[in-house]
Structures are given as C-alpha cells and as structure tokens.
C-alpha cells in the first residue's frame, strides 16, 4: 500500500497555516489592486509599516478591526465582512486547549452538542482514551481530572462530566451511526482506578451490541498498514477534529477530510470485531481486576 500523506504533526498544522496564508494573500492582493505600497497602506491605517508586512506575510494574525481598516484603505470596504469571516475560520482551525478550557470544560461539551446532534455518521479513532460518547461517568471523571490538573485550568470536572454524559445521549437517541476504532492498548490504560476501569470495559461490551454501533479493536500484534495516529473524530464527511497534546485542530478542507477518512478505512481493515474484539476486552477486564 502506498504511504498515506498523513502526519499527526504536520497535516493539522498545515491546514491552519494554509488558511492564514490564504487570508494574508487576499489582503495583500487588495493592496496591490489599489496600487498602494506597504508604507502607503500603513499610513492610511494609522499603524507602522512593519505591521503591514507582518500581516501580508501571515506572520501576524489581523484582528477584525485590522481587516476592516485594511479593506477601507484599499477602497474595498465591501469585502471586509467576508475576509473577517475567513479570518475567524482560520483561527478556529487550531485552538489551544488552554484557550478552549479557560473557563473549565463544561462549556466546550455544551457548545459541541449541536454538532453531535446533527451528525448522522460518526467515525472515531481512539489511540489514547476511549471515545467520549462511550465513557462511563467514573472513567470520564478520571480523564477530565487528569486534563484539568495537567493544563492548570479551572476545575469544573463534575459539571463537565454531566455535560459529557448529556452529549453522549446521541448514542441512544435519534438517527446516529457510530464506527469506532480503539487501539488495544487503550483498553489497559489506567486513567481511573481498576474497579472503575473494569466497569467501563463492561459498559463497552454492552454498547458494542447496539445495532447503530460498530466497534473495532486494533490488536497490539496487528500488522500495521497505517501507523498509530493521534485521536480524531470525523463528523459525517464534513469535518474532522484532531486532538493533539496542546490543541484541537478542526479540519474542513475536503481533501484533508478525505485523507483522514481514508486512514480510518485502512485502520478498519486491521481491526478485530465481534467475538475477537470481545476477547480483547475480556483480557483487559481481567487485567483491570487483578
């Protein structure tokens, strides 16, 4: 199989950088079309000429007011709204967890509920912890408490867990399908105490019996055609959320969404399902209880 053009570090960042570069190029194009030098534009905007250069080279992200001033200086005020929207989209592609969780984690769970409710086909690859929609309250508490401690963000873990459980109702309500892939090692990670992990694994065995859920476990000894990746959530064919240590990367560019869906398809081929998957869960359950 040819190597997939997918890197857990480069591709998500390249999406955000490309969007910022595209915005900078559009702004610089307006300047050139207006026949202005960088110095002349800076004079009209009332800022130093170095700021014009930094924005044009995508070294500095422009604020909404910067874009408005730039467009008006170029006689293109009617384009400001579209460019401001493009800027906000670019900024939302790569958002640091510290920023997302600055007020705690409850809000982010509540804010993503509409996305979960309108998605009909979820494809989730889990390489670190079990997918959020399958987590028990105790397991989720262990995960979220670790994240809060590591990031040093406000502790609203109890509220965040309740919000996560409310968001997880999509598994049981509405017309939603779930294709879930979990690396076998994830079944053994002690993100909570042994009895709580055992309860989580029992719950996993129950949920995989649902008709709208397909759960595949990728065995440790499986011959890899795709290397282990960072966790990602695909929402229909429209968006992929990639979880890195420092940030969440939201991908909407069709070609890159397709790359992640292709990787998911390849990973699906090496996963174990049905009885074999249950055996792997039982093995992890035995370990959790020992």
Image (cartoon, rainbow, N blue to C red):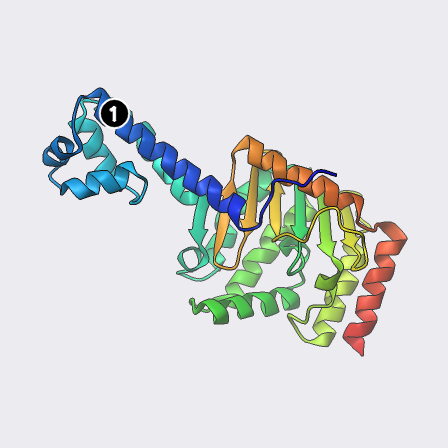
User: Residue 148 versus residue 60: which sits nearer the camera?
Assistant: 60
Q: Is residue 237 left or right of residue 147?
A: right
282 vs 16, left or right, is right
Above or below: residue 188 compared with residue 122 = below
Rendered location of residue 194, percent (x, y): 72, 75
Q: Nearer the viewer, residue 21 or 215?
A: 21
Q: Residue at x 61, y 46 (%)?
A: 233
Q: Decide if residue 126 is in sight here.
A: yes
Residue 83 drawn at (x, y percent): 32, 31
Q: Give the percent coordinates (x, y) of residue 223.
A: 80, 52
Identify the image quadrant of the N terminus. Answer: top right
Q: For mark 1, does the 10 Å Cα neighbourhood hold few (<14), some (14 to 19), or many (20 or more) residues? A: some
The residue positioned farthest toward the right in the image shown = 275
Side of 194 where 87 appears, left or right: left
Q: Report x, y in % for residue 227.
A: 69, 51
Residue at label 1?
30
Secondary structure beneath label 1: helix
Residue 126 position by quadrant? bottom right
Residue at figure coordinates x 48%, y 60% from the top left? 105
């Amino acid at each position: 199989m040819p190597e997939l053009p997918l890197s857990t570090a480069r591709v998500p960042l390249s999406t955000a950088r490309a969007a910022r570069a595209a915005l900078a190029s559009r702004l610089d194009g307006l300047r050139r079309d207006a026949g202005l030098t960088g110095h002349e534009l800076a004079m009209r905007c009332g800022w130093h000429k170095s700021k014009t250069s930094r924005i044009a080279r995508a070294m500095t992200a422009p604020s909404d007011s910067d874009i408005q001033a730039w467009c008006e200086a170029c006689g293109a005020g009617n384009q400001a709204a579209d460019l401001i929207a493009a800027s906000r989209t670019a900024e939302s592609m790569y958002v640091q967890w510290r920023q997302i969780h600055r007020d705690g984690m409850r809000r982010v769970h509540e804010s993503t509920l509409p996305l979960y409710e309108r998605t009909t086909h979820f494809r989730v690859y889990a390489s670190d912890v079990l997918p959020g929609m399958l987590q028990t309250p105790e397991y989720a508490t262990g995960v979220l408490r670790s994240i809060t401690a590591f990031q040093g963000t406000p502790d609203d873990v109890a509220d965040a867990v309740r919000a996560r459980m409310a968001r997880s109702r999509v598994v049981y309500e509405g017309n939603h399908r779930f294709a879930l892939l979990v690396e076998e090692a994830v079944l053994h990670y002690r993100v909570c105490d042994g009895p709580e992990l055992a309860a989580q694994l029992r719950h996993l065995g129950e949920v995989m019996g649902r008709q709208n859920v397909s759960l595949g476990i990728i065995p440790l000894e499986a011959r890899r055609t795709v290397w282990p990746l960072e966790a990602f959530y695909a929402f229909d064919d429209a968006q992929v959320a990639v979880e890195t240590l420092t940030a969440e990367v939201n991908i909407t560019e069709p070609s890159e969404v397709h790359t992640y869906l292709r990787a998911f398809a390849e990973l699906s081929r090496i996963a174990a399902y049905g009885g074999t998957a249950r055996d792997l869960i039982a093995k992890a359950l035995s370990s959790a209880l020992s």
